[in-house]
């Protein structure tokens, strides 16, 4: 079975002048969103604070829960629906007070106030300020070191600056766009979402390497063609594989998105964005950069 | 690699069987006793987010242990100075580890006392004030301070372990994290609030004498006599439920602490059938108690828990035999928890909860259910797709995929790694990525066939060319996974673990297992045309 006929020759690389603008727009949109929202919506992991997930046996209006919070003096508690009509997420960002005591107060008052609705506390998360800050630092280290490690690896594998640079810029683009989506959809940025970013980094460079490998092989075989053509041929040749792989991983993530339950919902949403970006960036960010570098920078050397 | 078909089959079969054996405990609980001794495995360990339970991180305020140590020294010093009739004015603890005193009299006399019996406190400075009064600042020897802190943390760990033991939780995990933090994991706990109360209380039991002569009212206005403190008793009005705070003027010196308790039990008052806690002291405690009561007949002895006065009964006579009671309008649960905490001992320093993550059992079960459904659906869809696209070769890939999942889960069981909800997502992801390796190989083989190579040559080239790319691409995700493991905690670590293991299992099955199957088909069964 052939998804892509063997001699397909779609001109991907030719379109790169247009797509540069699309990429630039995406990155700008991401930055704008983050800036306008005043940073990311940090989860309890990073920001510290208190999170309680109560579930009632009957459907409840969200205002009832908000009133209950106000009644115990927690007017600025953030209350949201979660999962279903009778399950909520109560989030309090103060970190300097006695969070344990607050948790107890909330649970007892909810229990008393809604005695007839069989309250069940599904989840409690309390993170003190020190731990939150710790985690944020660790997250930055994880991101930074991964980038570095991958840069070193790609440089070693491909032995030329061009390829390494292409890969890294593509990664950068993917990370930016994913964070942009996290900000745009106001997803809760917590540890699992960091996991998504790191996985996408791995996946994106994965994708890039497959195509670069093919380019290298073809460069050896097709000495007469110019680099642009070789890139196009390589991408076309690997197109089947790219679509299939991205397709299956996407399919799997979509299943998680629909059936995995509300707890990992934000996780899967971010992943979908990162996946699309990762595939796109290989063709329209990494490759153009290599071409640009080879032509304008290495090319100049050849002229002399 | 091993060329022979037979040898490879034996090796791979052995690995597969071993993997399945490792997984049996997870699938069924009906295994004979000797099973665990032969196959080193248990049921797959589920994370708290899947089985429900509580995860706590406590910070031991070890500084306070140093503070109380210095307090005790200060009180001892006051007694000694009085005994030696050395006049002293101000005598206070300042900061965590310093004592300041204004002392007069013969300098040699008190210097001798300090150096002989209080060498642990080093003289930081001594400056003369007026009229022969000296101001002396003492500081606790830093090594002693460090030791006190370390001891406090070790003791806190022990005490908390004791308390949790008495609470009765299956498979609790209590470990030291870093130097000052304690990690507690209580899977399957039904009443997290009660556990928090039990673990978090300092539960310092103290006996102090009431200062009968002092003026309580004057003290309340701010004029606390030297060597006294004010502590309060919480009185709940049974009718209205209102809480009153009754002040007591007490002599600061602690006559006795809960250290000398041998036992504490809940008992019922014969008159009102109200629960109280009956204390029994050990030999030292009994003798001490006898001494104190003997020396202070008709005075009141306050029983204090965590700086709250519980009661202050009058000592009617000297009490030998080492028994006492704590009363105070408890319900049975409160009394029982108090007894637990007294038996296990007081925490040497207060602990602060800096992180709590509690997942109720129903959420855990929901998560498990959703995780399993997702995994099954994904695996099924991927398998169907492979067959649809690659036909018979797709079946080969599917077999490898199944083995992949089994190997991943078996490795988790073998290393007692924890499976969490993000971990299940990681498993599902690695299934998606596993397809990639298979696709790389198959596409390559197709290409070689298209270029006219023979079946054997196509397979050879296909694997050869694809191998390098497979390693390259999976390696990068592996790198990311390793960093994630290092810097992540809890459920996210579970994700990193299953992703990494999944990828490695994937490389193994995609490259070696499928290769064997292709070889088997073409060499043994002499298949001439590849259905791919």
Image (cartoon, grey):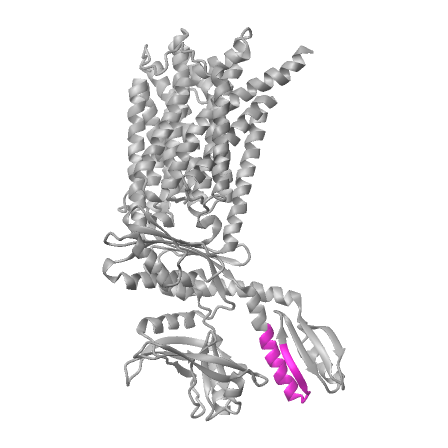
Q: Position of residue A216 (x, y in %)?
A: 53, 16
Q: Position of residue B382 (x, y in %)?
A: 32, 27
**Magenta span includes B433:** no
**Magenta span includes B80:** yes
Residue B77: image quadrant is bottom right
Between B389 and B186, the residue placed more toward the observer is B389
Q: Is residue A7 above or below residue A26?
A: above
Q: Residue at x 51, y 24 (%)?
A: A285
B133 sits to left or right of A254: right
Answer whether residue B13 is visible to the viewer in this image.
Answer: no
Answer whether residue A45 is visible to the viewer in this image.
Answer: yes
| Extreme-front residue of the structure | A36
Between B461 and A97, the residue placed more toward the observer is A97
Between B144 and B135, the residue placed more toward the observer is B135
Q: Residue at x 30, y 62 (%)?
A: A111
The span shown in magenta is: B70-92
Q: Position of residue A252 (x, y in %)?
A: 34, 32
């Amino acid at each position: 079975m052939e998804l892509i006929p063997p001699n397909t020759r779609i001109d991907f690389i030719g379109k790169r002048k247009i797509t540069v603008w699309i990429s630039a727009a995406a990155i700008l949109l991401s930055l704008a969103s983050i800036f306008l929202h005043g940073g990311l919506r940090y989860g309890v992991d990073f920001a510290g604070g208190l999170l309680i997930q109560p579930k009632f046996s009957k459907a409840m209006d969200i205002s009832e829960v908000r009133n209950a919070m106000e009644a115990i003096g927690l007017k600025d508690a953030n209350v949201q629906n979660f999962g279903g009509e009778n399950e909520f997420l109560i989030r309090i960002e103060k970190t300097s007070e006695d969070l344990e005591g607050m948790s107890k107060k909330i649970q007892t008052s909810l229990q008393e106030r809604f005695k007839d609705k069989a309250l069940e506390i599904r989840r409690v998360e309390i993170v003190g300020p020190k731990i939150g800050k710790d985690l944020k630092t660790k997250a930055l280290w994880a991101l930074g070191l991964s980038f570095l490690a991958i840069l070193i690896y790609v440089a070693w594998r491909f032995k030329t600056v061009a390829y390494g640079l292409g890969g890294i810029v593509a990664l950068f683009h993917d990370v930016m766009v994913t964070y942009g989506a996290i900000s745009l959809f106001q997803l809760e940025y917590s540890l699992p979402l960091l996991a998504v970013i790191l996985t996408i980094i791995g996946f994106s460079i994965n994708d890039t390497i497959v195509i670069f490998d093919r380019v290298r092989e073809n460069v050896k075989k097709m000495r007469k063609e110019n680099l642009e053509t070789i890139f196009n041929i390589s991408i076309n040749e690997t197109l089947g594989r790219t679509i299939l792989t991205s397709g299956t991983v996407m399919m799997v993530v979509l299943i998680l998105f629909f059936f995995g339950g509300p707890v990992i919902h934000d996780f899967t949403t971010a992943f979908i964005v990162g996946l699309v970006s990762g595939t796109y960036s290989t063709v329209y960010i990494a490759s153009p950069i290599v071409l640009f570098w080879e032509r304008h920078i290495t090319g100049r050397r050849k002229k002399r | 690699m091993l060329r022979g078909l037979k040898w490879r089959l034996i090796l791979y079969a052995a690995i597969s069987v071993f993997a399945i054996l490792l997984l049996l405990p997870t699938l069924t609980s009906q295994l004979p006793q000797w099973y665990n001794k032969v196959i080193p495995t248990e049921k797959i360990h589920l994370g708290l987010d899947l089985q429900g339970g509580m995860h706590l991180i406590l910070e031991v305020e070890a500084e306070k242990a140093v503070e109380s140590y210095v307090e005790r020294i200060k009180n001892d010093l006051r007694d000694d100075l009085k005994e030696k009739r050395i006049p002293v004015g101000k005598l206070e603890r300042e900061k965590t580890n310093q004592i300041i005193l204004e002392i007069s009299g013969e300098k040699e006399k008190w210097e001798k006392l300090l150096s002989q019996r209080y060498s642990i406190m080093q003289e930081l400075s001594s400056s003369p004030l007026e009229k022969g009064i000296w101001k002396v600042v003492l500081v606790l020897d830093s090594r002693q301070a460090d030791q006190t802190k370390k001891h406090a943390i070790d003791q806190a760990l022990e005490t908390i372990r004791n308390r949790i033991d008495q609470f009765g939780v299956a498979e609790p995990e209590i470990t030291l994290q870093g130097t000052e933090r304690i990690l507690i994991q209580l899977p399957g706990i039904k009443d997290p609030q009660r556990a928090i109360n039990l673990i978090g209380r300092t539960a310092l039991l103290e006996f102090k004498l009431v200062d009968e002569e002092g003026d309580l009212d004057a003290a309340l206005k701010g004029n606390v006599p030297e060597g006294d403190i004010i502590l309060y008793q919480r009185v709940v009005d049974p009718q209205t439920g209102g809480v009153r705070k009754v002040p007591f003027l007490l002599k600061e010196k602690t006559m006795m602490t809960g250290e000398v308790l041998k036992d504490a039990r809940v008992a019922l008052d014969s008159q009102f059938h109200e629960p109280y806690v009956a204390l029994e002291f050990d030999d030292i405690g009994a003798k001490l108690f006898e001494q104190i009561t003997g020396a202070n007949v008709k005075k009141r002895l306050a029983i204090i828990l965590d700086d709250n006065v519980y009661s202050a009964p009058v000592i009617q006579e000297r009490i030998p035999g080492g028994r006492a009671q704590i009363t105070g309008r408890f319900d049975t649960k409160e009394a029982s928890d108090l007894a637990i905490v007294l038996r296990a001992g007081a925490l040497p320093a207060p602990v602060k909860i800096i992180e709590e993550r509690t997942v109720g059992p129903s959420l855990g079960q929901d998560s498990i259910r959703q995780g399993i459904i997702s995994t099954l659906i994904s695996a099924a869809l991927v398998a169907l797709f492979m067959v649809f696209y690659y036909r018979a070769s797709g079946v080969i890939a599917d077999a490898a995929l199944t083995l992949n999942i089994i190997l991943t889960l078996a490795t988790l069981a073998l290393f007692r790694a924890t499976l969490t909800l993000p971990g299940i997502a990681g498993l599902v992801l690695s299934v998606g990525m596993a397809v990639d390796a298979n696709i790389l190989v198959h596409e390559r083989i197709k290409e070689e066939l298209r270029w006219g190579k023979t079946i054997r040559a196509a397979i050879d080239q296909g694997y050869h060319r694809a191998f390098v790319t497979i390693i390259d691409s999976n390696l990068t995700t592996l790198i990311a996974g390793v960093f994630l493991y290092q810097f992540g905690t809890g459920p996210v670590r579970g994700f990193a673990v299953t992703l990494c293991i999944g990828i490695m299992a994937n490389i193994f099955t995609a490259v070696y297992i499928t290769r064997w199957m292709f070889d088997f088909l073409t060499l043994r069964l002499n298949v001439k045309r590849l259905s791919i």
